[in-house]
Amino acid sequence: MFVCVARITLQVHDSGSLKARRQVVRRVLDRVRARFNVSAAEVGVPDAWERAEVAFSLVGGDRRHVNEQMDKVLGFVEQMYVAPVVARELEILTLGDQLYGDARSQAAIERHLSTKMQPTDRSLAEAEGLGDWDERHGTGQGGHAGAKPTQQELTLNEARARARSLRNRRDWEKP
């Protein structure tokens, strides 16, 4: 996975106020977002009247494609002639084996996903005193030795009424 981040500095001439500078920045951001599928935001010091820093980012699976797309974005901003580009920075970050693709990390993910609750483990609902799964849902199978008898299953309307009655936070704290 490749993440490309670019930052440009625009020289906003004839901006006598922050409002005029914000209009220029908003125009650049809106047009870039409408044309390209990138994240765009104003970064840097927002109180400078004559300078504005704008950053763009995009993610892709191919380094060359990510670089080409960002070059298109930066070229589009320069060709807009809204404000001249004074400075331009570009960086491509590679995220690979640390996130995915490494055999060790794949094995760790599979090991984590394959772990199951032991019969002695308690779920969050059980810890809050709501009983075990089978008891709450009326399956009658009993998750472990000493399971309590099953409750009667609720109809959909009864379940909705019970959920509505628990929406008040004070009701949750009642014993």
Image (spheres, grey):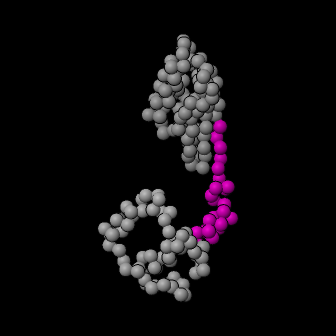
In the picture provided, is 134 more to the left or to the right than 4?
left
Up-down: is 88 above or below 155? above
Q: Is residue 109 magenta?
A: yes
Q: Position of residue 36 (x, y in %)?
A: 48, 36
Which is more toward the observer, 91 or 135? 135
In the picture provided, is 149 more to the left or to the right than 115?
left
* Region rendered in magenta: 91-114
Which is more toward the observer, 71 or 141? 141
Q: Quadrant of residue 13?
A: top right
Q: Is residue 8 visible?
A: no
Q: Position of residue 44 (x, y in %)?
A: 63, 29
Q: How many numbered marks are there?
A: 0
Q: Residue at x 55, y 33 (%)?
A: 41
In the picture as drawn, the residue positioned furthest to the bottom comes out as 145
Which is more toward the observer, 152 or 20? 152
Q: Quadrant of residue 150?
A: bottom left
In the picture provided, is 134 more to the left or to the right than 9?
left
Q: Position of residue 168 (x, y in %)?
A: 43, 58
Q: Position of residue 29 (x, y in %)?
A: 50, 30
Q: Residue at x 60, y 49 (%)?
A: 1
Q: Is residue 7 visible?
A: yes
Up-down: is 45 above or below 70? above
Up-down: is 35 above or below 174? above
Q: Residue at x 56, y 30 (%)?
A: 42
Q: Residue at x 47, y 58 (%)?
A: 169
